[in-house]
Image: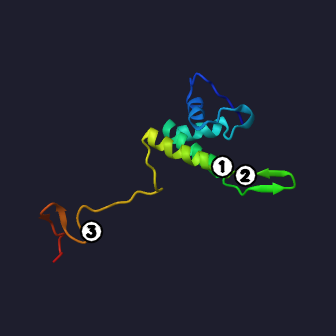
Amino acid sequence: MTYSYDPNLADDVSLVRFHIGDTDDAGHYLENETIQYHITAGSTSTAIINCIRYIITKLSSPDFKQDWLSVSNAEARQGYENLLVSKKQELGIYMTTPYTVITHAHRADSYENVDGEYTAPDGAP
């Protein structure tokens, strides 16, 4: 697995890294291949959102405390959750649910096709 970041933002992977703040080689969350997968599967904008969600998932592990060592992910996770909201607004992406809600303009049990026009199927009363 590889890591790269071009501060000139000359490639899509670097652009995604810039937006998600994953620009430190020593402590990066995502590998280039993972970011490239999300870019290929959607767009740079959706890759940014999906990568932030991935980082939130990684930071959602329980806090750890042993003797003198204490690891708390709560503050870092909250920071990324705030980043996710702001990036969705900035990029115009409003994915609130993983599915689409379909609404009918007319009652689903009527034969109304267009306002005021009713066409009953053959054999219907």
Q: Position of residue 15 (x, y in %)?
A: 56, 30
**Cβ–Cβ below 8 Å for labels 1 and 3?**
no
Q: Nearer the viewer, mark 1 or mark 3?
A: 1
Q: Residue drawn 86% across and 51% down?
A: 68
- Residue 17 vs 66, above or below: the answer is above
Using residue 69 as the reference point, say whether residue 49 is left or right of it: left
**Cβ–Cβ below 8 Å for labels 1 and 2?**
yes
Q: Earlier in the sequence, mark 1 or mark 3?
A: 1
State the image quarter where residue 37 is shown. top right
- Residue 92 vs 97, above or below: the answer is above
Tell me the kind of residue under disc 2: Ser
What residue is shown with label 2?
A: 72
Task: Give the SS element for disc 3.
Answer: loop
| Front-most of residues 16 and 102 | 16
What residue is shown with label 3?
A: 108
Q: Residue drawn 24% across and 61% down?
A: 105
Q: CA distance from mark 1 to mark 2?
A: 7 Å
Q: Residue drawn 65% across and 32% down?
A: 23
Q: Position of residue 30 (x, y in %)?
A: 66, 40
Tell me the kind of residue under disc 1: Glu
**Cβ–Cβ below 8 Å for labels 2 and 3?**
no
Tell me the kind of residue under disc 3: Ala
Q: Earlier in the sequence, mark 2 or mark 3?
A: 2
Residue 75: mark: 1
